[in-house]
Image (spheres, rainbow, N blue to C red):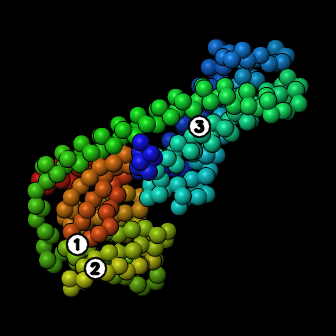
Amino acid sequence: MSRIFIKKYPSPRPVLKSLIIAVSSGLFIALFLLYFEPFNLHLNTDGNKVFHMSFFGCITTFVLLVFLYVFPLLLPNLFSDKNWKLGYQMILNMLIIIAIAAFNSIYSNYMNSIPFDWDSYWLILSRTFVLGILPIAFITFVDYYQKAKLNHSVAINILKNKKEIPKAPKEATHQISTDLKNQSFSFIENDFNYAISDGNYTDICFLDENTLKRVTYRVTLLSFETQLKEASSLIRCHRSYLVNLNKVKNISGNAQGLKLELINQSETIPVSRNYIPIVKQFFQKNS
């Protein structure tokens, strides 16, 4: 059972979706407390019930923004698909619930003019645990299994229809300009394996006289991608990766997306959720 916690899981990312989740969750909490008043929640609201119940929703929104948007923005190496696991997601969920419970407890005590004490804190924490941790843990597990099953099915479907793709003409080359003045480089498409982004730099992995090489150039992956010729087999498959789909020998799936195994290449190349349709379309078109 413990092995499930080391399985790959999509990491939180500082994107619009994270903002929407934070705001919508806060709104849900505010409405839930306003209309159902669970746990016999009685506050000295001085008649301004809507405002004070809404403040609980604001606490939820604030905590989620910090954990789902600010932390991934400040700690990109930790919050990356390369390192993120299901166990990390469960720990993150628990920290979020604990933070929400702590702020809710402080606010409840303030509204009722009660000095902060640990008994009150643990009472609020236990109630928040029942309301939040168990359902969120269940939803996270279900989400993991659904994503893993779906992506595994997609990988099998692509492999079933995948045929040997004709190689690009031997003379097919790409000329790429870098961010350094008057510096450019070229490569033969058939020799190219993949490119990986490293900030304003891009590492190019290719075959040179039957030897795998990796060279770094001062060019962003976006700039590299836009300079490629049309009808190329070099496809963006991840925010940090661009791959030669002609080099793919095997495809597998997990909760994060797809994994591409390349010919003569030990490192697997990730395909994130947003790029799965593009990769799938390429193989459908060329099968």
Figure check: 258 above or below 233: above
Q: Describe residue 117's horizontal placement relative to residue 221 as left or right.
A: right
Q: Is residue 58 visible in this depiction of the protein?
A: no
Q: Could you tell me which residue is drawn at 84 percent across and 33 percent down? A: 117
Q: Which mark is residue 264?
A: 1
Residue designated by label 2: 212
What amino acid does circle 3 point to? Ala
Q: Residues within 10 Å of mark 1 (few under 14, many from 20)?
A: some
Question: Which image quarter is the N terminus in?
Answer: top left
Q: Are marks 1 and 2 in contact (CB under 8 Å)?
A: yes
The CA span between labels 1 and 2 is 8 Å
**Relative image position of residue 64 (x, y in whole percent):** 61, 40
Q: Could you tell me which residue is drawn at 20 percent across and 82 percent down? A: 210
Q: Could you tell me which residue is drawn at 17 percent across and 51 percent down? A: 159
**Relative image position of residue 98 (x, y in whole percent):** 67, 38
What amino acid does circle 2 point to? Leu
Q: Which mark is residue 22?
A: 3
Q: Secondary structure at mark 3?
A: helix
